[in-house]
Image (spheres, grey):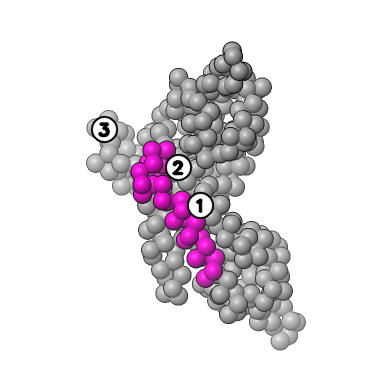
């Protein structure tokens, strides 16, 4: 049975009862997201989180980060400075004739930040401006043929890289099997096209890039790196520890990168490692109690953020932002009390 307000799948009878009570509160206007708006801080889960309760979260995050890399790579290939510039250009192409303020608001950006990107695009001939006859202010943005051609080339590059990402899923490579849900979601978004012929992966890409920025922001607030957090999450799924080679495969990191991350965590006593006495090589990595607690503390604001959506966001923005949230939260076996 699926609760109408929950993104999760089947639930036990006890969970159904809990969610039914929660649904009653929703109908009475007491949904936790509304109550949270009146609080000074973000809503919090109960204590005692165990990372092993979050199966596949590491793979889901890895899949989204790979999709971000595909977008960033495509933008760099076409001479853009970032993936956000590609998304901004595509937003203008989809809503030709919009004002700078509307474009910035739709991208959840400061007008000054969007203006800098628009100036660069205009200098490269990707867009043009309609100006006021009174004071010369820019009042509308239009995409040029060169800009449309660049968007098409970016989409083609993204599709090619996503095909490379999804190929291991298709052949059943074990370390990728749990990524199938997000992979399927990406494939479906690519298959959908709007009235102008653009596929809808740009909205998913925007949510992925937002998710990555929020992850980095949250992990830094706990004095941790994103890769360090991912390694702690992964080791939390394996109480007996795992080999560095297997961790590289799961996190899709180079051996040197994983070694640097692991050394940092070992120095901070967040990870314990077993070393071969003969060649001093690391055989097994496992979370220490401190590392397990840190990963559980970092999960709390991430979970709260995607449960309640971006701060001060309207319904439409929550819906768009929820595309990544739905894919990731669905992989988490826990529910919200």
What are the residue bounds of the magenta stretch? 152-180
Q: Quick one: label 1 or label 2, which is nearer the N terminus?
A: 2
Query: Which residue is identified by label 3?
Result: 12
Tell me which numbered mark, 1 or 3, is placed earlier along the sequence.
3
Q: Earlier in the sequence, mark 3 or mark 2?
A: 3
Main SS type for the magenta part? Answer: helix
Nearer-the-camera pick, 233 or 98: 233
Relative to 225, does residue 193 appear above or below in the rendering?
A: below
Residue 100: which quarter of the image?
bottom right
Which residue position is annotated with label 2? 60
Residue 130 disc label: none
Residue 205, given in percent of the width and then of the height, sits at 51, 56
Choose between 237 and 134: the one closer to the eye.
237
Q: Which residue occupies 51% across, 30% down?
A: 245
Seen in the picture, residue 205 relative to 60 is either above or below; the reply is: below
Evaluate whether residue 261 shows in this view: no
- Quick one: quadrant of the C terminus? top left
**Which one is nearer the viewer's eye here, 45 or 172?**
172
User: Residue 190 placed where, x, y %?
Assistant: 42, 61
Question: Which residue is under mark 1?
Answer: 67
Mark 3 closeness class: few <14, some 14–19, many ≥20 residues within 10 Å: few
Q: Quarter of the image for the N terminus: give it.
A: top left
Callout 2 secondary element: helix
Q: Determine crowd level at label 1: few under 14, some 14-19, many 20+ residues with C-alpha closer than 10 A.
A: many
Label total for image: 3
Question: Is 157 within the magenta?
Answer: yes
């Amino acid at each position: 049975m699926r609760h109408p307000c929950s993104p999760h799948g089947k639930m036990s009878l006890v969970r159904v009862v809990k969610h039914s009570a929660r649904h009653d509160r929703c109908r009475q206007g007491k949904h936790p997201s509304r109550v949270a708006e009146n609080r000074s801080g973000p809503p919090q889960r109960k204590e005692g989180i165990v990372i092993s309760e979050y199966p596949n979260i590491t793979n889901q995050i890895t899949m989204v980060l790979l999709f971000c890399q595909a977008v960033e790579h495509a933008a760099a290939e076409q001479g853009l400075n970032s993936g956000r510039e590609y998304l901004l250009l595509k937003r203008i192409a989809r809503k030709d004739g919009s004002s700078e303020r509307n474009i910035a608001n739709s991208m959840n950006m400061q007008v000054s930040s969007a203006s800098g990107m628009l100036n660069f695009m205009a200098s490269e001939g990707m867009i043009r401006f309609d100006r006021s006859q009174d004071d010369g202010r820019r009042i509308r943005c239009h995409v040029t043929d060169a800009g449309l051609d660049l968007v098409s080339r970016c989409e083609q590059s993204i599709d090619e890289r996503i095909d490379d990402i999804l190929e291991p899923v298709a052949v059943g490579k074990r370390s990728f099997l749990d990524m199938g849900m997000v992979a399927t979601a990406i494939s479906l978004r690519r298959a959908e096209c709007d009235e102008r012929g653009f596929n809808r992966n740009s909205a998913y890409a925007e949510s992925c890039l937002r998710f990555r920025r929020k992850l980095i922001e949250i992990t830094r607030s706990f004095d941790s790196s994103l890769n360090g957090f991912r390694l702690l999450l992964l080791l939390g799924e394996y109480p007996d520890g795992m080999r560095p080679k297997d961790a590289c495969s799961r996190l899709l990191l180079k051996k040197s990168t994983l070694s640097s991350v692991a050394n940092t965590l070992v120095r901070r006593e967040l990870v314990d490692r077993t070393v071969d006495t003969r060649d001093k090589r690391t055989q097994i990595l496992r979370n220490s109690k401190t590392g397990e607690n840190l990963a559980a503390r970092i999960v709390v604001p991430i979970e709260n953020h995607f449960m309640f959506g971006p701060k001060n966001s309207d319904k439409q923005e929550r819906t768009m932002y929820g595309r990544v949230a739905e894919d990731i939260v669905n992989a988490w076996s826990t529910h919200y009390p």
